Image (spheres, helix red, strand yellow):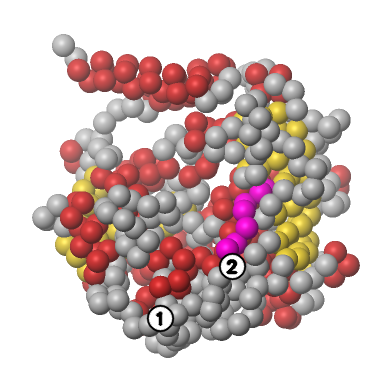
Amino acid sequence: MNHGNLSRRGFLARMAGGMAAAGLPGWFAGEMLVHAQDNSGNAQANDRINIGVIGTGTNYTRRTGDAPLRGERGVFLLREAMGKPGVRIAAVCDVDRTNRDFSAAIVGNDCRKYEDYRDLLRQTDIDAVIVATPDHWHALVARDAMRAGKHVYCEKPLTLTHAEGKMLVAVQRETGKTFQTGSQQRSEFGGRFRLACDLVRNNRIGRVRRIVTLIGSNPTGGPFQLEPPPQGLNWDFWLGPTPQVQYSKQRCHYEFRWWYDYSGGKMTDWGAHHNDIAQWALGMDESGPVQVYGSGDMPDARPHCYNTHPNFEAVYTYANGSNGAMGTQLVCRSRPAQGWNIRTPQGQLQENGILFEGENNQWIFASRGALLASNQRLIDEPLPANASRLPVATNHMQNFLDCIRRRQQPICHVGVGHRSVTVCHIGTIAIRLGRGQNQALRWNPQEERFMGDDQANAMLSRPFRAPWRLDA
């Protein structure tokens, strides 16, 4: 009896059932099954990839028991990679001893543990790394990993600043290493986002007038209590290139997202996902918008408080109109505008996702749990055989591993990740500057600079605390 074939048929049957339950059209489900059948072979023994995980995370300051918490990307990606054929997790690295021990215990007794990522990168048996540190460490770790000969899977957002992204693109080009940005909406969630983009790119709703990305509000809080760092946490190393400040638990681990020193709030969290899909749908992976303005509720100015804007909006314009004229508008908002009424068939209001608005009041909405349209026919009618189609990947980590073996670049390579997070970075700059529509920032996507605005251009990079340097 061929258990492999039985197992494969079982997998395909479960996949078909899941896609039907997700409300995806039959023609698209059929395509996905064909792709799964064609790509369901196992890795050979000599294709083994040894991986080191840098930045594991356990959020033990927020957890009860040992169950993983939402947002623990390092632990999640470690488990994801462990489950792939031909993969061995050789080492983990975290500046927090509790995190190191927690993640190493998942792997087993032969897992090496490091506090300093540079020690892990010196290990010649490690082929690739997963970078799941806080955002302010992504660029330095990924740069050093490529220079050490490692392939890189780097969590989104790719970088903390635009300058860091340009540096990573240059180093990847120099080293030729496979590099995947962790924007998994291109690969996963039943293919909903790819299907939405395919439909939009093939004029299913006509000319795209506007795209709205809804990404959620940033929390408020503070002033927070300052205290000594917990035993086993190297707080100075955690801060790395950012300014020296005293520890509070609301700055560290998952909560780093709500401080501009370490992240961009929801704009570079969910925004890195949804604005990436907007770029994909518009065919702007190698470019970007040409104008942006923004506004937001002012953050708390007191010391030791979360300081990302609680609610905000950034409005972008692309030069994809006739003969390069102003065209599609992208509106990235923390919450829906008044009158928003996109709902699932069950009546649930959709407050996180991407709305593509076209001609004649036609629209398509995609989220991780739904694919909706102004008329179901827009989704159910198959695309013609000669339609242009986007590349297919059904698992982001597997796509990374396959591309290492094939010596290719994956579906969200470093150039894509850089361009997508650039949308988020220039939007954050516009929000922080509070430039209204009459003072919109003009962005040159070819030169990757603002036009005639030294203040905005200065915000494309940040100083690094010694001894850390951004040098490519």
Which of these two is toward me, 54 or 139?
54
Q: Is residue 357 left or right of residue 243?
A: right
The spot of residue 144 in percent (x, y) is 36, 70
Q: What's the residue at 77%, 77% (across, down)?
A: 453
What secondary structure predominates along the stretch shown in magenta? Answer: loop
Residue 211 in view in this figure:
yes
Q: What is the quadrant of the N terminus in the image?
A: top left
Asked if the stretch drawn in magenta spans residue 214, the answer is yes
Magenta residues?
213-220
Q: Is residue 120 left or right of residue 248?
A: left
The quadrant in which residue 420 appears is: bottom right
Residue type at tag 2: Thr
Q: CA distance from mark 1 to mark 2?
A: 18 Å
Residue type at tag 1: Tyr
Looking at the image, how many numbered discs can be counted on the residues? Answer: 2
Residue beneath disc 1: 247
Q: Is residue 20 above or below residue 121?
A: above
The quadrant in which residue 269 appears is: bottom right
The spot of residue 253 in percent (x, y) is 40, 66
Residue beneath disc 2: 220
